[in-house]
Amino acid sequence: MHATACDVKVLEHLALTDTIRLMTTSWPRRDKAPKAGQFFMLRCWPADVAPVLSRPISVHSYDAAMGTIQFLYEVRGKGTEKLAALEPGDTLSLVGPSGNGFDVESALGKRVALVGGGIGTAPLYQLAKELNAGGTKADYFCGFRDEPYGVEKFATLCGKVQLATDSGRYGFHGFVTQLLNPEEYDLVLCCGPEPMMKAVAKLCEEKGVTCIVSLERKMACGIGACLGCTCKTTTGGKCVCKEGPVFDSKEVFGA
């Protein structure tokens, strides 16, 4: 699928925590429906104004009937600060959908666990929606440093929902990996901090369970032209934006 550039309207913009935002935009291109794990390059400032690069943000939720996309993101730099200043009615430039998302079809009918950490939980909501639409209710495991966000939305889409926090103020006091028993599943789909994903991948490898991960990298073009987001794999370097961001964990963590 080729990425499409489109100016859209911000419909709603919510602050879920001090640094986490949920932005809903229009998306009129129904012929370019995004899939779970894909992302868009977002920009709301002129090309000759810093920062130079647009911001890659994964699709949190897509509603074909409403023609809307939601982006769940963390404010942590100049680009996302500019995005966070947008208000309903403002215009935003989207380029996408880009990348290869999760292979939902191959997961249907299997015992599936979704494992997310922090803002890495963002693409898992659309993934849970697509799995649920195909008749598969995955179990959801999520970890946060302290205050969780968006967990309640998974309740109707998933089977078991388990929460872990580093602080212990919410849910289980510890790491999300301590809640996961990979042997109970046929497939584990994961997104979050790389150390967490490596830990999940190791647990899965020990039990002979397939683990699929979604990587995060700084991106310049978002289409594989600049090679700025190359990652090491067992078969050589690959562009996360074009050949990912979704990979088999053995391919990227076994390199």
Image (cartoon, helix red, strand yellow):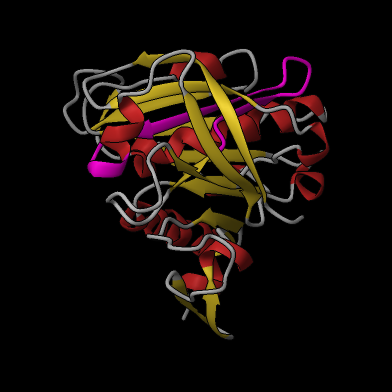
Q: Nearer the viewer, residue 46 or 98?
A: 46
Say which quarter of the image contains residue 85. top left
Q: Does 159 appear above or below 6? A: above
* Horizontal side of residue 212 vs 15, given as left or right: right
Q: Does 191 appear above or below 1? A: above
* Horizontal side of residue 12 vs 167, given as left or right: right
Residue range of the region highlighted in magenta in the rendering = 59-79
Residue 218: horizontal and vertical position, in percent? 37, 60
Q: Nearer the viewer, residue 247 or 182?
A: 247
Residue 48: horizontal and vertical position, in percent? 34, 53
Q: Nearer the viewer, residue 172 or 183?
A: 172
Residue sitting farthest toward the bottom? 236
Q: What is the tally of numbered marks visible in this picture?
A: 0
Residue at 77%, 41% in the rendered image: 32
Residue 225: horizontal and vertical position, in percent? 56, 73
Say which quadrant the N terminus sits in.
bottom right
Residue at 53%, 55% in the rendered image: 213
Residue 131: horizontal and vertical position, in percent? 73, 33
| Magenta stretch contains residue 145 | no
* Horizontal side of residue 121 vs 166, given as left or right: right
Residue at 41%, 54% in the rendered image: 197
Q: Does 128 appear above or below 38? A: above
Say which quarter of the image contains residue 61. top right
| Magenta stretch contains residue 60 | yes
